Image: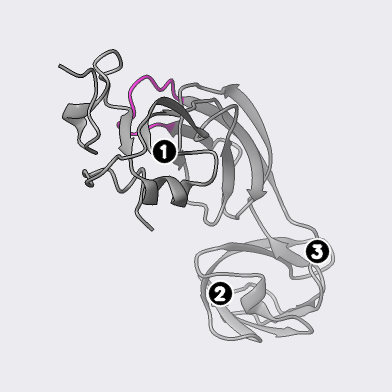
Amino acid sequence: MPIWSANDDPTGRPNYANVATVYGVDKAEAAVKGAHLGPGWVNVNVGTGPVVFKIANGGSGYANANFITVDGGTTPGVVNATANIVVGQSANLAGTLAVTSALVNVVATGVDLTTVFTNNAQMFVYTDNSTMVVKTINKVTNSTSMNVVGAFAASNAASKYGLAGVIQSITNIKEGSGFTTTANVTITGTGVNANVVTLGGRAGRTWYEHMVVVKGMKNDAADDTVFPDS
């Protein structure tokens, strides 16, 4: 009885490596993956790693009491990662915002609001030289106008404004381990648009080990998500 077959079928795996990560690869599938692979039986290894907390987008509307939790969903062997965050305000943005007391409308000059704000984000604006007001944006109507939640108490054309509650730094409490390409990121609070997580180490990296070279590998088992035909 042969110790492997030339059929791209799980039952034909080499009997000395009969594990779920060994796949039959035909000529077409090998060509898709690149010249480093040939047809035959191939073991696929997907690396794991910790979570690295990096601020790609600080978002807005977060608070210092918020924290980040990352888990691997249903991936086995994952140790969750956690981090605390410190927030602040963005730098003053270009242009001017005009706000009117007893109203919720904002009119912009010299800036395209659609490029800097989104619905439900938080903004800060100075209604005088020393008083900063933080508002949640209800709707960015167009490039020059938007409205906020709650009326302004004073009127002013403010040159000091920007995003409020922006994640500025992260304290890595536990980096976790065992992550591949699946991670569920949760930040407590009601902020929006933050992107703060990457996967470190070998997380998600795939490498291939030829178990057996079989030039005449044929048929096509249900492994197309790993080895597509085209």
Mark 2 vs mark 1, foreground winner is: 1
Location of residue 139 in the rendering, given as x and y in whole percent from the top left corner: 50, 76
Q: Could you tell me which residue is drawn at 58 percent across and 81 percent down? A: 146
Q: Closest to the observer: 123 or 102?
A: 123
Q: Are marks 3 and 1 in contact (CB under 8 Å)?
A: no
Label 2–label 1 contact, CB within 8 A: no
Distance, label 2 to label 1, CA atoms, is 43 Å
Residue assigned mark 2 = 151
Span of residues in magenta = 71-80
- The part of the image, by quadrant, that contains residue 173 is top right
Identify the residue shown where x is 66% and y is 82%: 100
Among the two numbered marks 3 and 1 on one chain, the one whose residue lies closer to the N terminus: 3
Q: Quick check: 138 left or right of 97?
A: left
Residue 219 belongs to the span the image colors magenta: no
Label 3, secondary structure: give it.
loop
In this rendering, is residue 146 above or below 41? Answer: below
Give whichever of discs 3 and 2 has the lower sequence position: 3
Mark pair 3, 2: CA separation:
22 Å
Residue 134 in the figure: left or right of residue 111: left
Q: Which residue is mark 1?
A: 182
Q: Residue furthest right?
A: 129
The residues bearing labels 3 and 1 have C-alpha atoms spaced at a distance of 36 Å
